[in-house]
Image (spheres, rainbow, N blue to C red):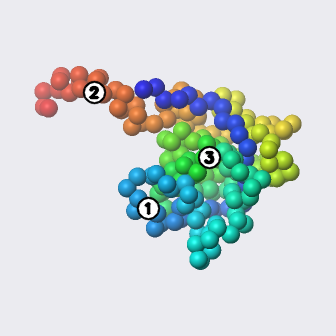
Amino acid sequence: MALEQIRVVSGTAVYVPGDDIDTDRIIPARYLRAVTFDGLGEHLFRDVRYDEAGHLHGRHPIDDPRHAGATIMIADSNFGCGSSREHAPQAIFRAGFRAVIAESFAEIYFGNSTTLGMPCVSLSSADIARLTAVVNADPSAEVTIDLDELRVRAGDLEFEASLDESARSALVRGRWDPIAELLEADSATAALEEQLPYL
């Protein structure tokens, strides 16, 4: 089972403002008890999207009807900081997002996102502001992340992006999930086991 080669991600986008958005804000700790990641998407940013009575107040950017169906999230610096919960990128992915653009990312969050096949690319603070202006002015504007050229395009604008080369290579070559690669090599692993005298 070959993994998808992720070279281009395109879609509409939504800007979630603020530096240091941590994993507890992305998915609160009480949802970490789930046996699977199913259903996590509905709890994305739960504590800042719902009031104390459990009602959606509609003031969070991802609940703005103008950004319904957005598949690219735009954020500021140090996105995904805090505890190293794998549930954070899982919640974002299961809410329908397929990439995140930010000024910078917490390292463990970045790694967990990459193994989901969800690129996390960085732009400068000035370029984040320019991209956000485009998206807010026209929520239907298509944003394209080109991993081959490391460029982000929106309308008439084009930005130079950055992405760790090992992550970029894994995504574009379809080698981003080490567990899937291990399962794919099951017959080769079994053959090697037969040759080892201590097994």
Front-most of 59 and 26?
A: 59
Question: Which SS class for mark 2?
Answer: helix
Circle 1: residue type? Leu
The reply to whether residue 152 is visible in this rendering is: no
- Determine crowd level at label 1: few under 14, some 14-19, many 20+ residues with C-alpha closer than 10 A: some
Earlier in the chain: of badge 1 and badge 2, it is 1
Left or right, 196 with respect to 27, comes to left
Earlier in the chain: of badge 3 and badge 1, it is 1
Residue for badge 3: 97
Q: Position of residue 123 (x, y in %)?
A: 72, 46
Dot 3 and dot 1 residues touching (CB under 8 Å): no
Residue for badge 1: 32
Q: Position of residue 28 (x, y in %)?
A: 52, 66
Residue for badge 2: 189
The reply to whether residue 19 is visible in this rendering is: yes
- Determine crowd level at label 2: few under 14, some 14-19, many 20+ residues with C-alpha closer than 10 A: few
Question: Which SS class for mark 1?
Answer: helix
